[in-house]
């Protein structure tokens, strides 16, 4: 018979656990659940932007929202900027590119399309659409442009904004879900239009544009005389050929700079419009929620509509009533042999080979030697090992449960700290899954968790 004896230590631990649960319940009451299905079903919701720090599951969240919205009747396109290409794999598509591709296997009346931003191709499309053929070719062949379009700081964020504006202008989908770029700062996406404007308005760019604005021989004279000292210095640092490429690029792009700035500002206003909803995605970790809190404040300052927080990969337990303290105490008692009382009815049965007993044996077969020992299995070791291994296994499981409960408590404290600071932010929790999501079924499961609002595992 197995029993536990109440101790002062366990009573205190129980009291602490009850107090912690009471505090958690009080804080939970202030956090409104994030209602995902009404957000997806609302025809006025045209853009959902999933943002947050890197590695918190933005891509998976965006894909799961897309699947759920499509299966509830929306015509959806998911734009991802994730170079890991997990979105294509989970949706059963060989590869994604700058063209939306329809996802097969969606169960419902809607449609789902997916695409992955090709930064350079998007930049090329801008040039081709807003310059005549000869000027477009001059720009596309320019070495400085090729470097700029392939990896210039901030280009990816701006091109994401540009592609979002293009998708919205086409009006082919009634819902666009954007997975923001994986960057060190989750605010880069919002800052892209301003950084572009600062770049275009910079003194260096305006100085390089001056000859084009003057034009003809006067412009060349201005360039040769007025900039001789500057170009000589920069040429020594960057190389004369590079400076020439920059000047040619700026001259060719002069007529397009205004359009770039105008579209960036238009997309920024689109993000502020009532039809847009921001979802901040975070993990239940201190650093991720700290950045999420900063993003919440920034969105409020920029007057952008925040729908709520998606708290991803939340751990749970089916035995949450057993606290970490009680589980550790029970494991210690098991390991010390103090939790199992050996009563007469539960005493282990002695092995037939135990000294002092006479085992029952069949009479020897005819022709065999009565003194020859019959082969016998070692029955002592399995019996002892069985009892020991069960106790050790139970103690190990109790310690694992204690570790899980400690993780749950840490995540709960971190979440409650965020909730206390931002009680106005609705929260949806997604349970941590045992493995990565690789298919539509996994994305549907994520969508179910999002709709439920609370992790249940």
Image: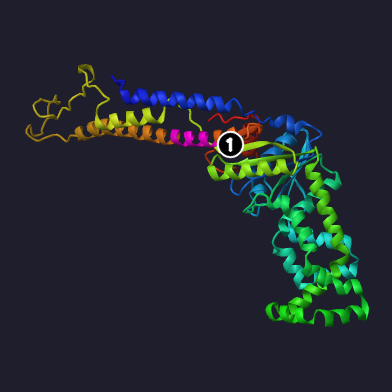
Task: Judge left or right: residue 317 versus residue 230.
Answer: left
In the rendered image, the vertical position of residue 258 relative to residue 205, given as above or below: above
Please, what is the dominant secondary structure of the magenta stretch? helix
Q: Is residue 406 found inside the magenta-colored segment of the image?
A: yes
Around disc 1, counting alpha carbons within 10 Å, would you say few (fewer than 14), some (14 to 19), or many (20 or more)? many
Residue at screen point 80% across, 71% down: 141
The quadrant where residue 83 appears: bottom right
State the residue lying farthest toward the top.
345
Assign a secondary structure to mark 1. helix
Q: Position of residue 20 (x, y in %)?
A: 47, 27
Q: Which residue is mark 1?
A: 418
229 over 139 or under it: above or below: below
Q: Give how far across and how far down residue 379 sits, in percent.
A: 21, 32
Q: Which residues are magenta?
A: 405-414
Residue 105 visible at all? no
The mark tally for this picture is 1
Q: Residue at x 65, y 40 (%)?
A: 440
Q: Nearer the viewer, residue 331 or 233?
A: 233
Work out which residue is located at the far left of the displayed protein and give it: 371
């Amino acid at each position: 018979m197995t029993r536990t004896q109440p101790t002062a230590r366990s009573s205190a631990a129980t009291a602490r656990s009850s107090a912690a649960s009471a505090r958690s319940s009080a804080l939970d009451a202030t956090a409104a659940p994030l209602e995902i299905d009404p957000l997806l079903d609302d025809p006025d919701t045209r853009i959902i932007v999933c943002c947050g720090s890197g590695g918190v599951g933005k891509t998976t969240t965006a894909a799961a929202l897309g699947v759920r919205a499509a299966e509830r009747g929306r015509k959806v396109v998911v734009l991802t900027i994730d170079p890991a290409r997990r979105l294509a794999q989970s949706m059963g598509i060989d590869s994604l590119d700058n063209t939306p591709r329809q996802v097969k296997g969606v169960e419902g009346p809607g449609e789902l399309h997916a695409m992955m931003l090709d930064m350079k191709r998007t930049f090329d499309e801008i040039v081709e659409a807003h310059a005549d053929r000869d000027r477009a070719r001059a720009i596309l062949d320019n070495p400085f442009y090729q470097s700029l379009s392939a990896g210039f700081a901030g280009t990816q964020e701006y091109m994401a904004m540009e592609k979002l504006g293009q998708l919205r202008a086409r009006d082919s989908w009634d819902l666009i879900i954007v997975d923001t770029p994986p960057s060190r700062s989750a605010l880069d996406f919002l800052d892209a239009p301003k950084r572009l404007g600062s770049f275009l308005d910079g003194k260096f760019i305006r100085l390089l544009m001056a000859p084009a604005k003057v034009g003809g021989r006067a412009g060349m004279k201005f360039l040769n005389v007025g900039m001789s000292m500057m170009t000589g210095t920069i040429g020594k640092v960057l190389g004369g050929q590079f400076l020439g490429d920059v000047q040619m690029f700026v001259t060719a792009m002069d007529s397009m700079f205004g359009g770039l700035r105008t579209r960036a500002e238009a997309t920024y206003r689109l993000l502020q419009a009532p039809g847009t909803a921001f979802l901040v995605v975070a993990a239940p970790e201190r650093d991720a929620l700290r950045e999420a809190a900063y993003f919440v404040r920034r969105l409020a300052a920029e007057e952008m509509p925040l729908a709520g927080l998606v708290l991803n990969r939340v751990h749970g337990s089916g035995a949450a009533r057993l606290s970490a303290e009680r589980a550790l105490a029970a494991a210690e008692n098991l390991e010390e042999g103090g939790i199992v009382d050996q009563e007469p009815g539960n005493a282990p049965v002695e092995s037939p080979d135990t000294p002092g007993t006479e085992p029952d044996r069949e009479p020897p077969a005819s022709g065999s030697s009565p003194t020859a020992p019959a082969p016998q299995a070692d029955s002592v070791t399995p019996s002892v090992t069985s009892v020991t291994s069960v106790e050790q296994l139970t103690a190990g499981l109790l310690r694992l449960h204690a570790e899980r409960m400690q993780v749950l408590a840490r995540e709960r404290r971190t979440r409650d700290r965020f909730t206390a600071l931002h009680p106005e932010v609705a929260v949806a929790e997604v349970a941590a899954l045992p493995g990565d999501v690789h298919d539509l079924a996994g994305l549907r499961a994520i969508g179910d968790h999002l709709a439920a609002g609370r992790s249940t595992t």
